[in-house]
Image (spheres, helix red, strand yellow):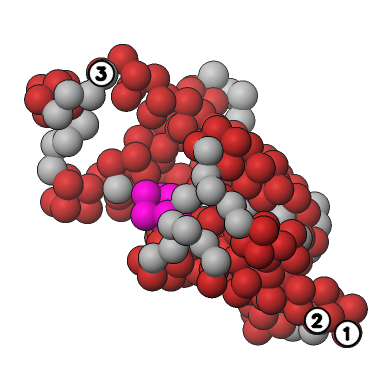
Amino acid sequence: MTISAFQFAFGSIVIFIMWSTNVNKRPKISTSLLATILPLAIVHTLGNLLTNLSLGKVAVSFTHTIKAMEPFFSVLFSALFLGELPTIWIISSLVPIVSGVALASLTEASFNWIGFWSAMASNVTNQSRNVLSKKLMAEKEETLDNITLFSIITIMSFLFTVPITLFVEGIKFTPSYLQSSGLSLREFYARCFLSGLCFHAYQQVSYMILARVSPVTHSVSNSVKRVVVIVSSVIFFKTPVSAINSLGKNFSF
């Protein structure tokens, strides 16, 4: 939760700088607009919290293997909320993804249920956010662009996360607490900064792409990054991967 709060805080700071310097025009925010965006902010907050929870419980490679199922949920929610029914080709392409995730899960050395279900739940929240965001941007195309929408969502998510983080985790980010835990302050704050920078940049670019393509195309394209993340994390963290587990990861892509 603390890391999630840092990520949203960094994004909020970037947004206020963009608004104050007119890099992006500050929107006229009404109560009705906030009420419309509120559900998106809630699922966006939950999606980030659940992803970070999974990353803390299992190997990074396993979390992103589970999140390779995003296209399945994107197809489902696109049919429910946008009325976009999938073709037989899309349905058939989902079979190896589901099979690969199941095979990788059964042979994952770091497997535990909290890590598995939190990653799966993040698929649900993130894809419902994407589909509903796409619907909202289509309805308010002339008044609400992708950067403005994501900016408001980020600030609202920060406001949601801070009180929850303080209530659940307390002040574990203060210098005195970190020093008493034996952590390097410089390393902790540097990594929080990099995490916030990468998270906000990735999410902003993701929304820019979402404004131009369908949620299904977006989720399928987004799966390409899983290959990079999984391979690099296995190398960096020296994660043990069996032959069957590797086969499951390959099937999921």
Q: Does the magenta stretch include residue 55?
A: yes
Relative to 49, 105 lies left or right: right
Percent of width and height locating residue 37: 49, 60
User: 121 and 76: which one is in front?
Assistant: 121
Disc marking residue 91: 2
- Kindly tell me whether residue 40 is visible in this rendering: no
* Residue type at the position of mark 2: Ile
Disc marking residue 185: 3
Q: Earlier in the sequence, mark 2 or mark 3?
A: 2
Q: Is residue 94 magenta?
A: no
> Taken as a whole, is the magenta stretch helix, strand or loop?
helix
Disc marking residue 88: 1
Residue drawn where x is 17% and y is 36% of the image: 172
User: 113 and 219: which one is in front?
Assistant: 113
Marks 2 and 1, how far apart in space? Answer: 5 Å
Q: How many labels does the image show?
A: 3
- Neighbours of disc 2 within 10 Å: few (<14), some (14-19), many (20+): few
- The answer to whether mark 2 and mark 3 are in CB contact below 8 A is no
Q: Which of marks 1 and 3 is nearer the N terminus?
A: 1
* Residue type at the position of mark 3: Leu
Percent of width and height locating residue 95: 76, 79
User: 64 and 165: which one is in front?
Assistant: 64
Residue drawn where x is 76% and y is 74% of the image: 96
- The answer to whether mark 1 and mark 3 are in CB contact below 8 A is no
Q: Is residue 132 above or below residue 3?
A: below
Quadrant in the rendering for residue 34: bottom left
Marks 1 and 3, how far apart in space? Answer: 53 Å
Percent of width and height locating residue 233: 57, 40
Q: What stretch is highlighted in magenta?
A: 51-58
